Amino acid sequence: MQLLLLSPDEFNLRIAKVREAMTAAGIEAAVVQTNANLYYLTGRVFCGYIYISADTAVDPVFFVKRPVVLHGDNVVRIHKPENIASELARAGIHIPNAIGLELSLVPYSMALRMQAALGASSITDVSGTLMAARAVKTPHELSLLRVSGAKHDAVYRKIPRLFRPGMSDIELQVEIERVARLEGCLGQFRVNGQDMEIFMGNVLAGENADAPSPYDFAMGGAGLDPSLPVGADGTIVRPGMSVMIDINGNFTGYMTDMTRTFAPAPLEGRALDAHKLSVDICRELARMGRPGIAAADLYNRAVAMAEEAGLAEFFMGHRQHAGFVGHGVGIEINELPVIAPRSKAILEAGNVIALEPKFVIPGVGAVGVENTYVVNTSGDMEAITRSPQEIIIFEE
């Protein structure tokens, strides 16, 4: 079984991006071992490591523990990381004194073990370097994201018919998840970092949307159990409340993020105004989101629009506010760039960004939309989640 599932051109393009980022960060060589980055660099997940030198004369080496059937150029079977140094020496590859490891992601004990195995005098964090390389998608990655977006839309078109009067939020979520899986959703949603967890997404009915969560999500929810305190909590869906559905879409290994607001009966007043403003903010930020603009400028414009409308108190939460209005998305649900006030990121063509300017209205619940966009070389950002954005009334 061939290890590398990417075409040679695609693989070379991705390795070149990683090497360029490593060189800019002053990292001579790195060892990659986390699933998201292994998938990015090979097109598959395996148990093992990739040795990457910033020197273009040194080919990457793939060290595989499992599955044992993988083969290909520069694929080496090993039983433990202590085998890596001798195999590199056999190939005539010199290991520099300083090695880049995914220190933000791997356990401390593993980092020390790898340092000792490679005989490195120091280790440095390559996690951010890899994230930066992944932030600008290749044309092939964009094609996979567009497929996910289209299938994601197909799921959302079926949601209005899934509701039954008297249903709880979790019952509705289960029905949506079933439809998503039958549509081809993989059910796997990778999240970067240790301070966020989620299953397939959030369904937030009524006041539960105002329940603060320990996770850095735009909307919280109490959840069903303290072991996963986010999302649906068993609330019965009734007229007068909103139901915000933020079910993620992973149909290709690349995720799109989309939120739509539903309700059993039409919403009025401040809730309706806030929802329309969310759509307007998305439209405005998509117009602004061109290569060269600062991510912080997008955030500041969204806040200014909420303030001008007198809705800042409810923007990105009510009892607890999120400190961002969007984020990169791809192999993981939270990638670069982050659309936040202190972000130093400058948008580039090929960035894929989920914008989610949401509001929580006391007594009603959460309203607003979230769309996934591609930053183009010129012109407005392209939405690749295209479901209707108005508040959608459930069918009975």
Image (tube, rainbow, N blue to C red):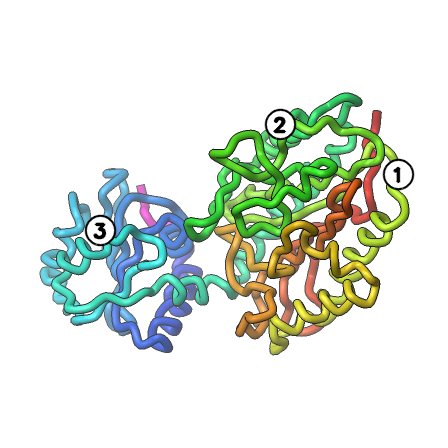
Looking at the image, which residue is at 23% across and 51% down?
110
Quadrant in the rendering for residue 154: top right
Please name the amino acid that badge 2 sits on.
Val
In this rendering, the label closer to the viewer, 3 or 2:
3
Q: CA distance from mark 2 to mark 1?
A: 24 Å
- The numbered disc on residue 60 is none
Q: Is residue 369 above or below residue 187?
A: below
Q: Is residue 381 visible?
A: yes
Residue under pointer 2: 174
Residue 2 belongs to magenta span: yes
Looking at the image, which residue is at 19% across and 56% down?
112
- The numbered disc on residue 109 is 3
Residue under pointer 1: 266
Query: Which part of the image, by quadrant, shows the N terminus?
Result: top left
Looking at the image, which residue is at 30% across and 57% down?
32
Dot 1 alpha-carbon crowd within 10 angstroms: few under 14, some 14 to 19, many 20 or more = some
Q: CA distance from mark 3 to mark 2?
A: 39 Å
| Dominant SS in magenta | loop
* Labels 1 and 3: the sequence-earlier one: 3
Please name the amino acid that badge 3 sits on.
Ser
Q: Is residue 104 left or right of residue 253?
A: left
Q: Is residue 179 visible?
A: no
Residue 57: image location, x then y, percent:
25, 72
Residue 374: image location, x then y, percent:
63, 62
Dot 2 alpha-carbon crowd within 10 angstroms: few under 14, some 14 to 19, many 20 or more = some
